[in-house]
Image (cartoon, coloured by chain):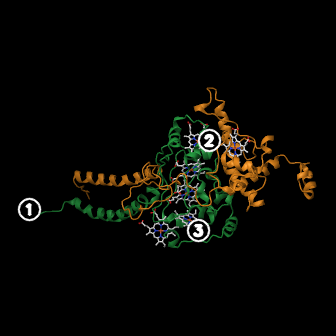
Amino acid sequence: MSRFLFPRWSNLLLPTIILAAATIPVYAIFFVAYGLSPKTLEVGYQPEQPVPYSHALHAGELGLDCRYCHTSVEKAAHASVPATQTCMNCHTHIRPESPKLAKIKESYATGLPVPWIRIHKLPEFAYFNHSAHVSRGVGCVSCHGRIDKMEVVYQNEPLSMGWCLECHRNPDKNLRPLSEITNLAFDATAELSASEHQALKTKFDINPNDNCSTCHR
Amino acid sequence: MIVSLPPRWMLFTGALAALALAVPPFVIARVRATPDPNRAVHIFFDMDFQPKFRPQSVNPLFADGRAQRPSVLGTVARGEAGLDVHLSDGVVNGKWADTLPAGMTMSRELLDRGQQRYNIYCSACHGYGGYGDGTVNKRAMELMTNSAGPANGTSWVQAKSLHDPLVREHPLGMLFNIASNGIRTMAGYSAQIDTADRWAIAAYVQALQLSQNASIQDVPPEIRDNLKKEVK
């Protein structure tokens, strides 16, 4: 019986194994850090809404202020999605017979709400408050992106805890005067100097807070 | 030295494995660059979804699905009975009120607030200057003059200029009432704007009207000369 001899090519096994041992952890880290990060998984969620309502038309082209529809955003934790009545302020007279508005008309007649699909959603153990931000100089654009250019709304930021804290630890460059809160074209970082940011910080008395109990209560 | 290679099938599997490793980065890059109509899969639910209702969420127990219950028909919430007709309707002794309701005073802050609220809720149709030239009004008038007839049944009436001689006659209480309940084809805004803000808007509309129809006599004497110089 002949003895088993390793073939000559098995000399290549050792470098191959070393190469794999060196690259696979790097690869795995990359995979977890990029592939499973909220920036990949959460950003870009863009469900199809029951009515082809366009922010690019209403908030962009027509220039409606966000608060015309999201009325509670300055006063409450929740930014309300408008009732059908709000659409009917205009659409009783503007294109009432458009097929794109059929669902709105139906909702107006029956009193049942339009089943808008929720886009931005934190886990329910986290506490968030719109009025705390909007009335203290943080504009919609910092957290929602250029809504006024979106035909269909999508999520523009990860809304992860790391993302919240990034701003809470260094809010200065995100602050803007209250008159520009809903002006999405206003770029607070570019248009205000460091001393203006500092002045706003003093004016609104902002003390960055990263205590767990701020958001987990 | 001759490099001897492993058998074909082994090389082939190796190459395939390396190729397979290159796929996830492409998938990740694609997912990052494109919107996605589906929400991320929840593998660990943790306490992400809790058996409680948040504002505007769905409750399947009710026929209309609203977790936030509308008030029961025929009931009145405390403090919302509208007993103070001056505050809630802008009426005093059966006539339009000329004054703000009790508890509100005319001030710079009130007018500033009114201006801000006017710009949010009214300027879309009436324009920032009140001349009825807002963006929505312009667009709607274009739809009316469509060569094939008003588009999709549009029936728009030009938003009134607030500097129309008739509108300038309106007392404060009537302006408040128009902002609350609308007039003819204009809808009311009581659901979107709270009562104090509607009064602030009414006060601002009167200030706006005055500003567009002012004479030199309305300017305080001490700054009249300055103004005259500036105009020249």
Numbered mark located on residue A2 in the image: 1
Instruction: List the residue tagged with mark 2.
Output: A90
Whether labels 1 and 2 share one chain: yes
Element type at marker 3?
Answer: loop
Among numbered discs 1 and 3, the one appearing first in the sequence: 1
Look at label 2 and name its amino acid: Cys
Tell me which chain appears orange.
B
Answer with left or right where residue B157 lies relative to residue A209. Answer: right
State yes or no: discs 1 and 2 in contact (Cβ < 8 Å): no
Look at label 3 and name its amino acid: Asn
Whether labels 3 and 2 share one chain: yes
Answer with left or right where residue A25 lies relative to residue A91. Answer: left
Numbered mark located on residue A48 in the image: none
Tell me the distance, in whole angstroms, between the alpha carbons under discs 1 and 2: 93 Å
Give above or below for A98 relative to A126.
Answer: above
Q: Residues within 10 Å of mark 3 (few under 14, many from 20)?
A: few
Answer with left or right where residue A79 lies relative to residue B127. Answer: left
Tell me which chain appears green.
A
